[in-house]
Amino acid sequence: MKPIIRTEDLGKYFGEMAAVHAVNLNVQQGLFTSVIGPNGAGKTTLINLLSGYLLPDTGRIFFRDTEITRWEPHRRVKIGISRSFQVMNIFPRMTVFQNILLAVLSRLNKNSNPFSSLKSQKAAVEEAEKILNEVWLWKEKDHPASQISHGDQRLLELGIAVATDPQLCFLDEPSSGMNPIERIKVLELVKKLAAERKTTFVIVEHDMDVVFSLSDRIVVMNRGKILAEGKPDEIRGNQEVRDIYLGEEI
Amino acid sequence: METLAFQGLVGLSVAMYLWLLAAGLTIVFGVLGVLNFAHGSLFMLGAYFAFTFYGLWGINFWLAIALSLLAVGVVGYLMERLFLRHIYHLDHAYQLLLTFGFILIFDDAVKMVWGGVAKIPAMPSFFEGTFSVFGRLFPFYNAFIIGSGLLVAVVLWLLFEKTWWGRMVRASASDREMASAIGVNIPTLFTGVFVLGAMLAALGGALGTPVRVVAPGIGAAMIIQAFIITVIGGLGNLKGAFVGAVIVGLLSAYGILLFPVFELFLIFVTMAVVLIVRPKGLFGG
Amino acid sequence: MKKLALLLLVVLLGLLPLFVGKYTLYMTIHIMLLSLFSLGFNLLLGYTGLLSFGQAGFFAVGAYACAKILLAAPSLLLGILGGVAVAGVISLLLGLLSIRHTRIYFSMLTLCFGMMIFSLAWKWRDMTGGDDGLVGIPRAPLEVPGLFRINMTPMENYYYVVLVFTILAVYLFYRIVHSPLGLTLQGIRDSETRAACVGISVRNYRLISFTIAGLYAGLAGALLPPLESTVTPPVAHWSHSAEPVLATLLGGIYTFAGPIVGAALFYILKDIIVRFTEYWLICLGVIVLVLVMGFRGGVVSMFYGKGGQR
């Protein structure tokens, strides 16, 4: 099966330090993929390179058959890639509903329309309402995004990420900064989205329960390189992987 | 040919005022992340203070310069401590609006204190006169200015490369959190850098008083020049400030010679060209 | 309720010439011009998150272009629309140069370009009349050939022209900010990164916003020459660019009507201040300082984000 996204010898260096080095990644369509590894392994840098937030120093990136190595983020979104951020990135002054609506309008290529009222964009409004329900935020619909709870903001972040109806969606530590109750909710939502949508999810996570229960494939990174990849059982049994986690239960 | 060479010298002396102005602006931006719109006003204040001390009160020239630096240093200290310090952590728009407000205040303040008419004080006697170069007569004072500018360049280089304070400043510029973590007193450092920037601007203004017009409005004119220099040279880059100042100085000198009346527009066009070709400036990025 | 108040306001403005003198009418026209000027400015600041210190440049382009047209072909409509069009083109071109940068750099560039236009207005004698400016600009009749021709000599007539243009422009602005485009701009203001990551080309939309702001500044500028019959370089000066900044700060950045209310407040304030002192700029500056320092963080936060944090 053809990979939905793959990299050739991808590298990103900050001075002497290799944040990402010689990475040859293959993500298969439809397979929920997790990227794990100790802190500083290069996981977020990898996501940033794949989503266009950072440009690589070496190597190439292919989305299906198209080379997207130096494409700007908004272009990558237009061909079907989206992401969520580890540090929350929502539109704080806009309402929760408007947050989602904007993403939907972008997907429908309607956001340059300068005259028609937002209400009249029936298709976009309906879709945004559907997504709002999907991420359990209907109650918060008209509240400014900066004023909802931290946990709900994370749900919103996920909602925005899927509102562009992506083929490939990167979730960078979606449960980071959450208290235990919020974490459960967020990860439940991830599970739900993965099950119900046709999107291929690539998630960076530290919660091993989630990683091993949800993933079809796991990629392990260490010091900027890919240490191992494979099915969860293969990874669990991999001695090198166990070593870098130094006895943690995986 | 000789005319061109001579005009180049003229341009170089103009460039040195601009260098002093741009150096302070770029250092403050590089370290504090603040683009001080009122920086040109500090240049203007330096000129006014020097005019008062040297031109009106007859104080010794060198002492007058030193006092002007001190006076503007105090103004800069108050600006940073009372106002800017409290908005560093906020959206950049705050600092831009605040410093823009300061331009408005300083512009009228000098009119209130010194009146609206331009001033031209006398040249200190030991600098009077000219010498012959490239077949024309070049004022000693201008040569002094060129020398001073180069001296300041060397001093700043030594300061930032060789001294302990300079190293702390550079560390704070590139990673504020890290510097704070290793014990650098960031607030005090920031005040110090801001005052340094203010004094550099004041030096430019003060040194200009014997030969340049001291008038309200030169503050705003200077800040535009400083901005253009940072566009050409690169924002936050000291080397870029020097090169940019030289370029703008030469452009204005040759502009007056070759495109009179529109020499200022020529400088703006150069800025626009740099923006297209090298958006981050010659040394930026 | 709001609609009723609005209707009352429009009726009041419509009946104004019947019970006030020429000076008040003149001031009201100026307030309307500043309102248009400030609305455009706030599309950039309140809606898109960009702070421009050079809008007076486009105001001046609109004013000078209208003046040149009226001096050559005395048709009011041609002058006004021509002024707006030229201002739009210039703002598009300068926008292309300015918009590709960080927001601080952008603000710096706007000050530079505004003053570049000022220096042109001041030095290009052949075109702009230099520091004497353009004089003898006729308050040309409002005419559509073959349909109607209305004499503009009485100020009341010109007042109505300005009023109609203002109402139309304000209505248009309302439609724009409540449209998908308006929402997109606000998204860019709230989070440039997030906007890009939902597929928005931040650069393109900032340029659109900048051009619309330039068109509004140009309209305000184009409506000036028929009123004053002269146009001089100070209309392009940065101190004129300060007016929409202050009006918007006074009236409120994050509201639709803020710039309009602020424009009125600005003129009232100016009227009061100049009776006591000629040092008008210093008062402006102090007001800016108070507004900026008084609103940082806190309950009434002037700028977006979690209490205005970077």
Image (tube, coloured by chain):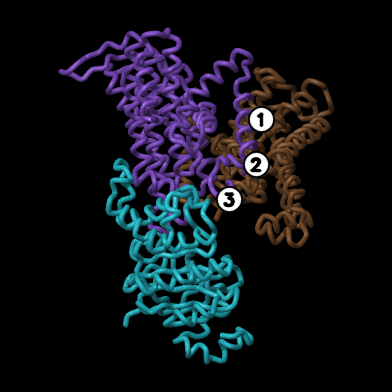
Chain colours: A cyan, B brown, C purple
Q: Rate crowding at label 1 as few (under 14), some (14 to 19) or many (20 or more) other CA atoms within 10 Å.
A: few
Q: Rate crowding at label 3 as few (under 14), some (14 to 19) or many (20 or more) other CA atoms within 10 Å.
A: few
Quarter containing the N terminus of chain B: top right
Question: In whole angstroms, how far apart are the C-alphas of marks 2 and 1?
Answer: 24 Å
Give the amino acid at mark 2.
Answer: Trp
Look at the numbered discs 2 and 3 and tell me whether their residues touch, using CB distance below 8 Å. Answer: no
Question: In whole angstroms, how far apart are the C-alphas of marks 3 and 1?
Answer: 54 Å
Horizontal relation, residue A72 to residue B254: left or right? left
Give the amino acid at mark 1.
Answer: Leu
Chain bearing tag 3 is C
Query: Residue placed at 65% from the left, 41% from the top?
Result: B19
In the rendered view, tell whether residue A48 sits above or below residue B78. below
Q: Which residue is mark 3?
A: C310
Horizontal relation, residue A136 to residue C251: left or right? left
Residue B58 pos. (x, y %): 82, 22
Q: Rate crowding at label 2 as few (under 14), some (14 to 19) or many (20 or more) other CA atoms within 10 Å.
A: many
Q: Nearer the viewer, residue B98 or B45?
A: B98
Kindly report which numbered mark, 2 or 3, lies closer to the viewer in this rendering: 3
Q: Nearer the viewer, residue A53 or B237?
A: A53
Residue furthest to the left in view is C146
Q: Which residue is mark 2?
A: B19
Residue A112 pos. (x, y %): 32, 47
Labels 3 and 1 share a subunit:
no
Question: In whole angstroms, how far apart are the C-alphas of marks 2 and 3?
Answer: 31 Å
Residue A107 pos. (x, y %): 33, 58
Query: Residue placed at 62% from the left, 42% from the top?
Result: C298
Q: Which residue is mark 1?
A: B137
